[in-house]
Amino acid sequence: MNADPLLRLRVLAAGLHAGLYAEEHIALPYERVWAVASDLSGELPHLIPFLREFRVPPGDADRVPALAVGRSGVRAPFEVRLAPGWCLMQSRLIVGGMAAVPEGDGTRFAVLGATRPAPLRPAQWLYGRVLGERRGRAFVHRVTERAASR
């Protein structure tokens, strides 16, 4: 990635009017934090409460197909772009992303969640005002806990 992954995620969050965005310093080394964030199949179901499974085929491709399976059994195909410090996951309705960079002795980490269709923006706005900040901080906290236990 040529550009700072955090700056890219901030710009994406602003452009999508993301209902969920959180950015914090985590007092753990970048390698440990990113090991959790980039392990989508193994860790994402622990980080997102309503997600039962996130299937990503093994490999090194820049763009890979993935399948999200919710706790209710609902399935959604995603396209995933994963690179050091950068993860972007997009379905027809949802955009999710994570970014991380080393910062001092720790890591600056960010997460975003947004809807894609414009008609869903009012719901996204309401979600952002009511739950977005709290859910974003909770996500960062879960990443921190998972990284600390590695």
Image (cartoon, rainbow, N blue to C red):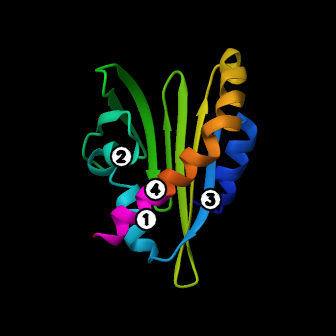
Q: Contact (CB < 8 A) between labels 3 and 2?
A: no
Give the answer, above or below, for where 29 lies relative to 39. Answer: below
Give the answer, above or below, for where 117 lies relative to 106. Answer: above
Find numbered disc 2 in the image and state the secondary structure of the residue it sits on: helix
User: Measuring 35% from the left and 71% from the top, which residue is drawn there?
Assistant: 148
Q: Which residue is mark 1?
A: 144
Residue range (magenta): 141-149
What amino acid type is highlighted by mark number 3?
A: Glu
Residue 68: image location, x then y, percent: 35, 30
Front-lying residue, 140 or 67: 140
What amino acid type is highlighted by mark number 4?
A: Ala
Q: Counting other residues with Cα less than 10 Å from the Cα at mark 1, is it few (<14), some (14-19), or many (20 or more)? A: many
Question: Which one is earlier in the sequence, the residue at label 4 or at label 1?
Answer: 4
Please tell me the numbered disc located at residue 83: 4
Find numbered disc 4 in the image and state the secondary structure of the residue it sits on: strand
Find numbered disc 3 in the image and state the secondary structure of the residue it sits on: strand
Q: Which residue is mark 2?
A: 44
Q: Counting other residues with Cα less than 10 Å from the Cα at mark 2, is it few (<14), some (14-19), or many (20 or more)? A: many
User: Measuring 26% from the left and 40% from the top, which residue is drawn there?
Assistant: 57
Q: Along the horizontal axis of the image, is 89 left or right of 44?
A: right
Residue 137: image location, x then y, percent: 56, 54
Question: Which one is earlier in the sequence, the residue at label 3 or at label 1?
Answer: 3
Question: Which one is earlier in the sequence, the residue at label 2 or at label 4?
Answer: 2
Find numbered disc 1 in the image and state the secondary structure of the residue it sits on: helix
Residue 145 is a magenta residue? yes
Give the answer, above or below, for where 144 lies relative to 98. Answer: below
Q: How many marks?
A: 4
How far, Cα to Cα, is label 4 from label 1? 20 Å
